[in-house]
Amino acid sequence: MGARLGTKQKIIEVAESLFAEKGFKDTSLRAITSQANVNLASVNYHFGDKKTLIRAVLDRYLEEFMPQLERELESIDLRTNVSTNVSMTDVFYALKAPLTNLDKEFDRGASRFLLLVGRGYSDVQGHLRWFITTRYGHVLDRFTQAVIQANPNLDKETLFWRLHFTLGTCVFTMASSEALLEIANSEFEVNTDVEAMFDQIVPFLASGMCAD
């Protein structure tokens, strides 16, 4: 049993690394089995097919991220009422703890998670979006409602584009976080970290979502 679990974990970790580096479409099962030093039968036994393996890789992160995001969004509801409007800054800061927690659970967890999500969109992985919305749709709906509450005048099309521009900004920033932090620390002689970078990006994203 232990050997089976070891093989499954090895496949997931190798697949995750290759998916993040090359994308889902350009990573073959052959490449995964070769680097993980397992045969195709092992992948078929544990996952059945490539789509299921992709979902398993991302779900490691989602199982940590989504419940914590839901709790953060609930705390916003408790802090606000009809006389107190939720702001986009509040909504985006609800993402801070769930993302930074991923760095504690996984090596470069936040950047790897956002990069994998970005790959899911750029590679047009419809099955992955279906999986996320089916399994975690209630959390996504709650996040969207918080955004709408903060921006009641946004129409659905504008909301769609701005949320995806936000995602694109986050994917680029987090995927490049090591280089950006090194440049910032060198240029400005400060000891900047991921949390400080998050504090920089939130006002920018909030202003973009609320733009006229």
Image (cartoon, rainbow, N blue to C red):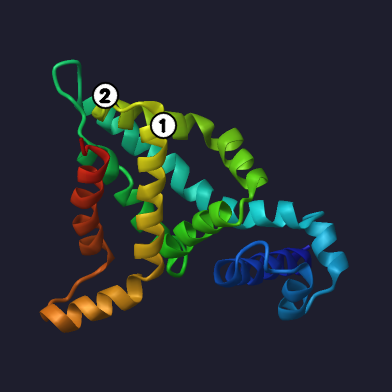
Residue drawn at 67 percent across, 66 percent down: 9
Question: What's the amino acid at mark 2?
Answer: Asn
Q: Nearer the viewer, residue 12 or 123?
A: 123
Which quadrant is home to the N terminus? bottom right
Residue position for label 1: 157
Q: Quadrant of residue 92?
A: top left
Left or right, 42 with respect to 94, comes to right
Residue farthest to the top, as pictured: 82
Residue 57 screen position, x and y as percent: 62, 58
Q: Position of residue 46 (x, y in %)?
A: 79, 58
Above or below: residue 124 compared with residue 136? below
Q: Choose between 43 and 208: the one closer to the eye.
A: 208
Q: What residue lies at 26% left-to-right and 29% top-to-bottom?
A: 151
Across and down, in percent, residue 130 comes to 63, 39
Check disc 1 and give the amino acid type.
Answer: Glu
Q: Nearer the viewer, residue 61 or 162?
A: 162
Q: Which mark is residue 153?
A: 2
